[in-house]
């Protein structure tokens, strides 16, 4: 069920002093990570960014995320509202309709948003805003027409980038299983919405889809099983 055409880039913002992080990562010698300045993060914050990869590649190279373990105990993401984990999904092969259906799964109802927030773990704030729920058709096609510095860049799903759709709903973490869960969620949401019509984009059907392909989305499925009661409280049955 993995989609080889979908390339993912993930970023994890951190507030630890840059020289400490760079020394730790240099010791581990990761071959697909680089550091990027981020003016929204205080205290000399940096963003840890991976080069693009596919979910298939990550499954075949499980040790690629091991360097994250050196960050345990560091000030990661949740320490400041401007920080979090972002997953960039390539627009390659993705039409405006495809973006719309992807957004519909995350934004289309209060229950879908509740599920997305539960999986993402990041509270809504000015850096992860859900205020655009009523404008999905416009949002699905705005990447070329709007000012790239617009506040819409901070939406829960940022469609302002020309080459990617950026999902910003995830709480930052150095836990490898949690990182994999987040990446699998984006991959599963795209795969699910690609194969369905607008009227078939439903949260219970999505959860059944993840369960059906649990081998591809094992970390996401484990999370869903652990949070079954929370999901039921959202009014979702499957």
Image (cartoon, rainbow, N blue to C red):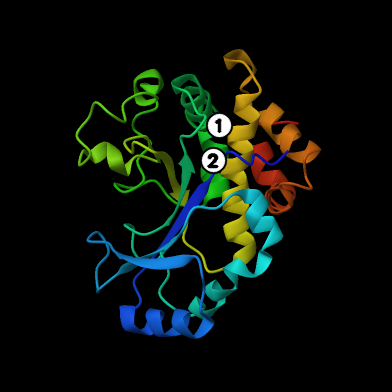
Read off the residue under disc 1. Answer: 112
Counting from the top left corner in percent of width and height, residue 82 is at 31, 57
Counting from the top left corner in percent of width and height, residue 171 is at 47, 56
Q: Which one is in front, 129 or 64?
A: 64
Image point (62%, 53%), residue name: 181
Q: Are marks 2 and 1 in contact (CB under 8 Å)?
A: yes
Please tell me the numbered disc located at residue 87. none
Q: Secondary structure at mark 1?
A: helix
Relative to residue 118, is residue 218 drawn left or right? right
Please tell me the numbered disc located at residue 116. 2
Q: Which one is in front, 156 or 148?
A: 148
Measured in 3D between alpha carbons, the distance from the residue under mark 2 to the one under mark 1, in whole angstroms, is 6 Å
Q: Which one is in front, 215 or 199?
A: 215
Relative to residue 217, is residue 94 drawn left or right? left
Callout 2 environment at 10 Å: few (<14), some (14 to 19), or many (20+)? many
* Label tally: 2
């Amino acid at each position: 069920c993995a989609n080889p055409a979908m390339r993912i880039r993930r970023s994890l913002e951190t507030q630890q002093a840059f020289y400490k992080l760079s020394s730790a990562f240099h010791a581990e010698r990761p071959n697909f990570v680089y550091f990027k300045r981020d003016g929204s993060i205080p205290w000399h914050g940096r963003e840890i960014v991976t080069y693009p990869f596919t979910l298939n590649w990550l499954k075949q190279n499980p040790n690629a995320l091991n360097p994250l373990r050196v960050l345990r105990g560091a000030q990661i993401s949740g320490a400041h509202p401007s920080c979090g984990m972002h997953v960039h999904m390539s627009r390659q092969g993705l039409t405006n309709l495809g973006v719309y259906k992807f957004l519909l799964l995350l934004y289309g109802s209060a229950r879908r948003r509740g599920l997305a927030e539960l999986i993402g773990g990041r509270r809504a704030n000015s850096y992860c805003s859900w205020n655009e729920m009523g404008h999905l058709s416009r949002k699905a096609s705005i990447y070329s027409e709007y000012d790239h510095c617009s506040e819409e860049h901070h939406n829960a799903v940022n469609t302002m980038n020309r080459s990617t759709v950026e999902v910003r709903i995830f709480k930052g973490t150095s836990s490898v299983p949690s990182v994999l869960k987040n990446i699998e969620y984006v991959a599963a949401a795209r795969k699910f919405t690609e194969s369905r019509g607008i009227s078939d984009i439903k949260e219970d059907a999505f959860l059944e889809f993840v369960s059906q392909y649990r081998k591809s989305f094992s970390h996401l499925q484990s999370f869903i099983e652990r949070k079954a009661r929370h999901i039921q409280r959202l009014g979702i049955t499957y």
